[in-house]
Image (cartoon, rainbow, N blue to C red):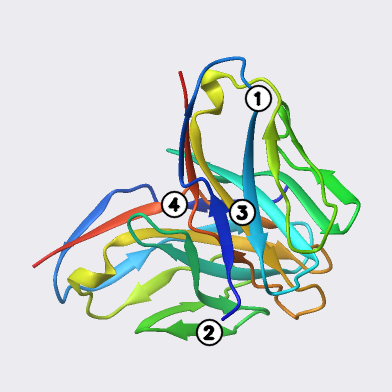
Amino acid sequence: DAEITQSPRHKITETGRQVTLACHQTWNHNNMFWYRQDLGHGLRLIHYSYGVQDTNKGEVSDGYSVSRSNTEDLPLTLESAASSQTSVYFCASSKPGASYNEQFFGPGTRLTVL
Amino acid sequence: GDSVTQMEGPVTLSEEAFLTINCTYTATGYPSLFWYVQYPGEGLQLLLKATKADDKGSNKGFEATYRKETTSFHLEKGSVQVSDSAVYFCALLIQGAQKLVFGQGTRLTINP
């Protein structure tokens, strides 16, 4: 069955370190998204991509970057981790052209920055 | 800008009670509306959707009607179960765009 996976599921790191969170989907969806989930804020969009070599900033993109070298993967990099980036991160994908563009979510990565 | 406002939680009910979670939105275009559910330790799953005014989305006993006149998409269920305990998110998608805007989520706990 097609799916979307994230790794690692849990990560503890130190302030100032570079961290990369992986997202892999097997639906061949062109659209991929990264969100962070924090209490009281719901899900906020960090970065998104509409296809290979395409990346766009979301509402909370400072301190994060993404790259899209193939359809299946959209890794999220924290260039220099900060305590404010402690959060749960969700990756999602969708198929463009659908009338309602349902997004399918991964299981999440819980990141703690000490 | 586009935004979604949900009733604040947490909400605690007894089994078989009637549930309403309020959701209102602000949008410049004609959005599609969604309810997503997040069970403990999991990612979000689409619960139901509506793509135009007066549409009713339904799934697993949950319903929501797209009310353009009141810019609302309230989630309802006639008789909740313990297994409905989760966090519920209302979201909108602007026609032509491909990004979701989420409300802050409402945590629901159902006691036996």
Q: Nearer the viewer, mark 4 or mark 3?
A: 3
Residue at left 36%, top 54%?
B41
Left or right of B65 in this view: A34: right
Q: Secondary structure at mark 4?
A: loop
Residue at left 18%, top 69%?
B82
Which residue is denoted by mark 1 in the rendering?
A18
| Dot 3: chain letter | A
- Cβ atoms under marks 4 and 3 closer than 8 Å: no
Query: In the rendered structure, which amino acid carries the disc numbered 1?
Result: Gln
Q: Position of residue B85 (x, y in %)?
A: 26, 63
Q: Earlier in the sequence, mark 1 or mark 3?
A: 1
- The lab-note entry on whether marks 4 and 3 share a chain reads no
Choose top left, top right, bottom left or bottom right for residue A76: top right
Q: Which mark is residue B105?
A: 4
Nearer to us in this view, A37 or A54: A54
Q: Secondary structure at mark 2?
A: strand
The quadrant of the picture occupied by the C terminus of chain B is bottom left
Residue at left 67%, top 71%?
A26
Residue at mark 2 to residue at mark 4: CA–CA distance = 21 Å
Q: Earlier in the sequence, mark 2 or mark 4?
A: 2
Query: In the rendered structure, which amino acid carries the disc numbered 4?
Result: Gly
Decide if residue B26 is in sight here: no
Query: In the rendered structure, which amino acid carries the disc numbered 2?
Result: Lys
Residue at left 73%, top 27%?
A62
Which residue is denoted by mark 3 in the rendering?
A91
| Depicted B42 relative to depicted B65: above or below | above
